[in-house]
């Protein structure tokens, strides 16, 4: 089902006419903002990483689109909160392919030398694999969801051929089945413009 959703998204997006576009490979770090729990295990955000490529479409105007594919590994420290000593259980490493579909507006600049812009839009996340690095007795609570739908807002700065982005992603559902609340993610990336 998740692959069908991805195929439909890519087919629809490929119909958009492209006036001018830039390709932006990027890499960076991420971290879950809030903690959440499943049963007696609490998950807290640790620093993870992200890498991918974005396409900026319609960059010849102040209003332009940004989409792409990015791999994100989200790291969560698992702690047994039912214990009186709060025993650390290890790190759960969740892997996602994220597909943002953002609309961006150039606030300052917009030229080839300097640009400051804001962006916002929906994000689809396709989960795959899970590293069960927690204790085997608690592995049953680490059930990563296969599909997330969320929203994101961010700000970016371009200087010459480099770009820096800070992004906040809010999810409309939980990362893990039976989690106590939704998880939100900060991402900071450094990239290049071609």
Image (tube, grey):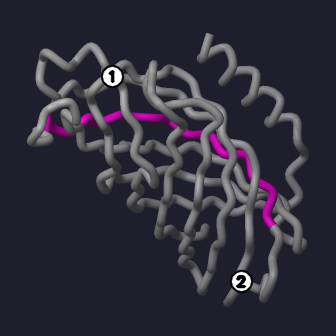
Kindly identify the residue that appears in the image at 20 percent across and 38 percent down. Answer: 79
Kindly identify the residue that appears in the image at 53 percent across and 48 percent down. Answer: 184
Quarter location, residue 153: bottom right
How far across and how far down the image is residue 33, in percent? Answer: 45, 54
Of 155 and 137, nearer the camera is 137
Which image quarter holds the N terminus? top right
Q: Name the residue under label 2.
A: 115
Of 155 and 53, nearer the camera is 155
How far across and how far down the image is residue 66, in percent? Answer: 73, 55
Which image quarter holds the C terminus? bottom right
Quarter location, residue 57: bottom right
Residue 39 is marked as 1
How far across and how far down the image is residue 97, in percent? Answer: 50, 35
Identify the element where label 1 is drawn. Answer: loop
Identify the element where label 2 is drawn. Answer: strand
Determine whether, in the image, residue 14 is placed left or right of residue 69: right
Determine whether, in the image, residue 3 is placed left or right of residue 11: left
Question: Of the residues tagged 2 and 1, which is closer to the observer?
Answer: 1
Q: What stretch is highlighted in magenta?
A: 88-104
């Amino acid at each position: 089902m998740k692959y069908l959703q991805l195929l439909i998204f890519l087919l629809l997006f490929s119909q958009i006419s492209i006036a001018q576009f830039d390709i932006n490979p990027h890499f960076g770090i991420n971290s879950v903002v809030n903690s959440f729990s499943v049963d007696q295990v609490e998950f807290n955000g640790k620093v993870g990483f992200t890498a991918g490529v974005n396409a900026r479409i319609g960059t010849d105007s102040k209003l332009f689109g940004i989409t792409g594919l990015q791999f994100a590994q989200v790291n969560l420290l698992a702690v047994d909160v039912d214990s009186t000593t709060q025993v650390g259980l290890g790190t759960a490493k969740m892997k996602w392919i994220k597909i943002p579909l953002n609309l961006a507006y150039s606030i300052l600049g917009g030229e080839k030398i300097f640009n400051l812009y804001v962006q916002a839009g929906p994000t689809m996340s396709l989960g795959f694999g899970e590293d069960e690095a927690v204790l085997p007795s608690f592995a049953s609570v680490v059930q990563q969801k296969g599909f997330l739908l969320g929203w994101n807002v961010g700000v970016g700065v371009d200087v010459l051929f480099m770009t820096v982005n800070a992004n906040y992603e809010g999810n409309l559902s939980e990362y893990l089945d039976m989690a106590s609340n939704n998880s939100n993610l900060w991402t900071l990336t450094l990239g290049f413009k071609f």
